[in-house]
Amino acid sequence: MSRPDFLEWIAEITGEPPLTPELYIRAATHGSHGEKDYQRLEFLGDRVLGLVIADHLYHQFPHDPEGQLSQRLNGLVSGPVCGDVAKHIGVGDHILLGKQARDDGARHSVKVLGDVMESLIGAVYIDHGMEAARHFIIRHWDSRVTAIVADIRHPKSALQEWAAANNRKVPAYELIDKSGPHHDLKFTVRVSVGNIGEVEATASAIQAAETEAAKKFLEKFT
């Protein structure tokens, strides 16, 4: 990436001119490219994202009980959602990757994109403070907050409730396959409910695979 173009892009997506360009370059540097990668910034950005979204939900939905707020939060800060936001704003075009990671398709990996999205949040937080980080997050997550209003029940919770209501055993989840390069692992999970059936689903995280399997089970058997 050319540095001027990259910094212009950062200013565009964050709404703030970069004060410390090196922060954002590090935020976009994958471990395959060099020692100074995005992992520490990702760690920080993950926590900032969680706090900002939790605060936003607390004020947006003043009558929701804790359980519903938690379901909304878990959906909005998940790896796939972070990866989707990153894809939407063009993060993949700016990630610094080593040759092997490039050849393995890391630029399009949902996990890598999600990690870089969180690291960019961490960079904005350090460079401009909490309010700038909050603005950055809400700007790119707000439509997703609105989208989850219609269906806040988590598929795994819905499946468990269905099983209980129909006098069935608790749904059983089993990891049956793990494949792919380290930066883009795929997990296949099977969910089964006794005497009803079973369904498999694959995703970039075990929790996401379990969620997708529960969703597919509900669609198929209920």
Image (tube, rainbow, N blue to C red):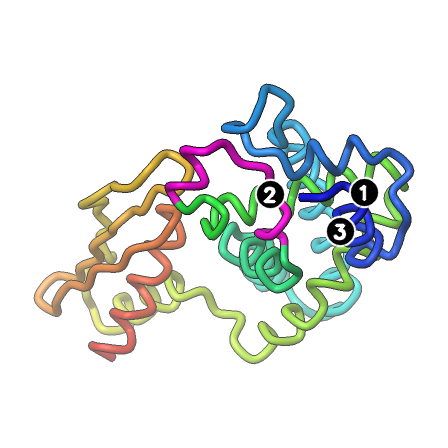
Residue, x 89% and y 49% (percent of image)? 131
Instruction: Give the main secondary structure of the magenta stretch.
Output: helix
Check the picture and name the quadrant holding the C terminus: bottom left
Mark 3–mark 1 Cα distance, whole angstroms, equals 13 Å
Residue 31 at what x, y percent from top left?
53, 28
Q: Which image quarter: residue 146?
A: bottom right
Inspect the image, locate mark 1, and give the three-letter code of the amino acid beneath it: Val
Apparent side of residue 220 relative to residue 14 in the rendered image (left or right): left
- Whether 131 is among the magenta residues is no
| Range of magenta residues | 91-104
Q: Which image quarter: residue 73?
A: bottom right
Read off the residue under disc 2: 95
Residue 77 at what x, y percent from top left?
59, 53
Read off the residue under disc 1: 124
Q: Residues within 10 Å of mark 2 (few under 14, many from 20)?
A: many
Which mark is first along the chain, 1 or 3? 3
Residue 122 at what x, y percent from top left?
74, 38
Regarding residue 66, the answer to whether it shows in the image is no
Check the picture and name the quadrant holding the N terminus: top right
**Secondary structure beneath disc 3?**
helix
